[in-house]
Amino acid sequence: MTAMTRASDQPWKAIFLPWILSLFLLSLIVSCATTIHPPQAFLQSTDASWNQWLDTVVDVDVAEVRIAYLPLTDAFMGVKLAIARADEQVESMRVSLHASQITRRQALWLLAKKYDLDMSVEHVPGQPPYIGIAKE
């Protein structure tokens, strides 16, 4: 009878243990991502309002969004992007990032690292800065 009870417990553990482990790992990854900070110079500009916008804390919930459409998402609303050299590979790229309470600068840095992108601040006289994006 005891052997029968143990055998019936195994399918329950086999089903729920991977879920519990997955949730734990996901929370650990998100926690680590929000504590990793970009280098000091990442997307740094002499424009104070630009730096303030980048250093604003937001929640990022982006799933399979074309990189050109990032400015349409809540976290990046209004930012201007330019894909360097009409890079079709970057233009059609879809990105995902889910993180709570991180700065926009940090979120962009995480996307740059995750998808091997080179991001830089570009300036046109009389216009607000924009982000130039190219594949590394």
Image (cartoon, rainbow, N blue to C red):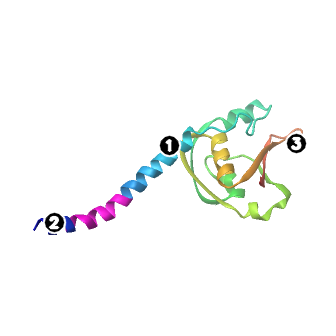
Query: How far, Cα to Cα, is label 3 from label 2?
Result: 72 Å
Q: Earlier in the sequence, mark 1 or mark 2?
A: 2
Q: Residues within 10 Å of mark 3 (few under 14, many from 20)?
A: few
Secondary structure beneath label 3? loop
- Name the residue at 67% across, 49% down: 113
Secondary structure beneath label 1? helix
Identify residue type, mark 1: Ser
Image coordinates for residue 23, horizontal then vertical, percent: 41, 53
Q: Residues within 10 Å of mark 1 (few under 14, many from 20)?
A: few
Image coordinates for residue 66, horizontal then vertical, percent: 67, 60
Task: Identify the magenta region.
Answer: 8-18
Question: Which residue, given by chain and number where applicable, does mark 1 sit on?
Answer: 31
Foreground pick, 67 / 117: 117
Q: Residue furthest left?
A: 1
Query: How far, Cα to Cα, is label 1 from label 2?
Result: 38 Å
Instruction: Evaluate if marks 1 and 2 touch, with contact meaning CB atoms under 8 Å apart.
Output: no
Name the chief secondary structure element in magenta. helix
